[in-house]
Image (spheres, rainbow, N blue to C red):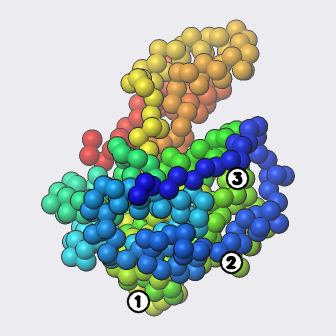
Amino acid sequence: MAPHIRQRTASVPTGWFSPQDCDIDDFVAVVQDATDPSDYPFADAVANNVLVYGPGIRDRVSDDATRHEVQAELARALLDGPGIVVFAGAFDGAVVDAATAVFNRLLAEQAAGSTVVGDHFAKPGENGRLWSALDKLAAADADVFVDYYANDVLALASEAWLGPNYQVTSQVNVVYPGGTAQVPHRDYHLGFMDSDQAQAYPAQAHLLSPALTLQGAVAHSDMPVESGPTLLLPFSQRYPQGYLAWHLPAFQEYFARHYVQLPLDKGDAIFFNPAVFHGAGTNRTADVARMANLLQVSSAFGRPMETIDTTAICLLVYPVLRRRVVEGASARAVANVVTAAAEGYAFPTNLDSDQPVGSMAPLSQARLLEQALAETWDDEQFRAALTAQQDRRRSPLA
């Protein structure tokens, strides 16, 4: 049986979205849908509109033909369906426990230091956060790393949404008793921007962004609802203006009234379209430190064709640009050169050392270059600041 291919006939919008385009009634019409189990024959259950796949799915995908059928079903669910899938018992409990022991050791070492670890959508220091956990797990215990990332459910879901050659990143999140809920949001890429930044990207980019990443989480502890597992709004990934809408009070209030939560057992895994409105819940227990390994899986395609040393280019052109600014070059001409010369995007980075300050993302190389030009730094001042920035961005393994 060939994989089902769903034809999408709606045209892709162009132009630019604005907050005025966000209509709560239109949003409600999109999200007030129901998941029909008959559309997803490989799923074992539907809970709160979320598809649940049992441990038996791993045996069913052992041959390529069935694997592709299952992956086509998962892609439909993530794109046009509820946007969320859960795999019960996805990870072996012993493997999870071994990784948890490493993570706890690393978190304890981090807590003994003096750095307050930031968070994108919660108060800094309120949760336990282990950034760059993929690198750190490999460095701390390569055997555990190999056992953990040999998992085929992770590969099944990632390939279904992104295809091969994807890149995994991992951030461990521990929500302690009393930890409060995150602001409901969408996720990386456009979800890590404030409304003004997101508006600068044209409408087609708003539809492209969710196709570049897959969000996932592995439960490293049992997560009863009172411990605050992720709050989710099924079908919300369908709303085209959602990267602006989630900032608006009317949409946040609707989310607060209509989100769903699924309890998870240790070893369960959840994957969702990054455009789904979601946020970690409040931990109302007295004794459950809810630990999840948050997995962000990126498409192989989000990279340029050639290797470019933007740091070297910035150092070479800065004296010229500074002189041109003094000579009266237009702001647009300078901005165009900055875009060509510098890395304009803040990620990837090392969030341990390159933390966001007053924003959801750290300062990008392009913004640093603009700051230097605006404040007329001399060449050595710019070189020192640029070098320090690059040092902060290095992997913890570097």
The residue at which mark 1 appears reads as: 287
Q: Residues within 10 Å of mark 3 (few under 14, many from 20)?
A: many
- Name the residue nearer the viewer: 142 or 131: 142
Disc 3/disc 2 C-alpha distance (Å): 19 Å
> Which one is earlier in the sequence, the residue at label 2 or at label 1?
2
Residue 240's mark? 3
Residue flagged by tag 3: what amino acid is it? Pro
Q: Dot 3: what SS?
A: loop
Left or right placement of residue 106 versus residue 196 in this view: left
Q: Position of residue 249 (x, y in %)?
A: 77, 66
108 vs 339: above or below: below
Q: How many marks?
A: 3
Q: Disc 3 or disc 2, which is closer to the eye? A: 3
> Which one is earlier in the sequence, the residue at label 3 or at label 2?
3
Residue 258's mark? 2
Disc 3/disc 1 C-alpha distance (Å): 40 Å
Q: Which residue is depicted at the point 45% across and 91% down? A: 286
Q: Position of residue 301 (x, y in %)?
A: 45, 37
185 vs 104: above or below: above
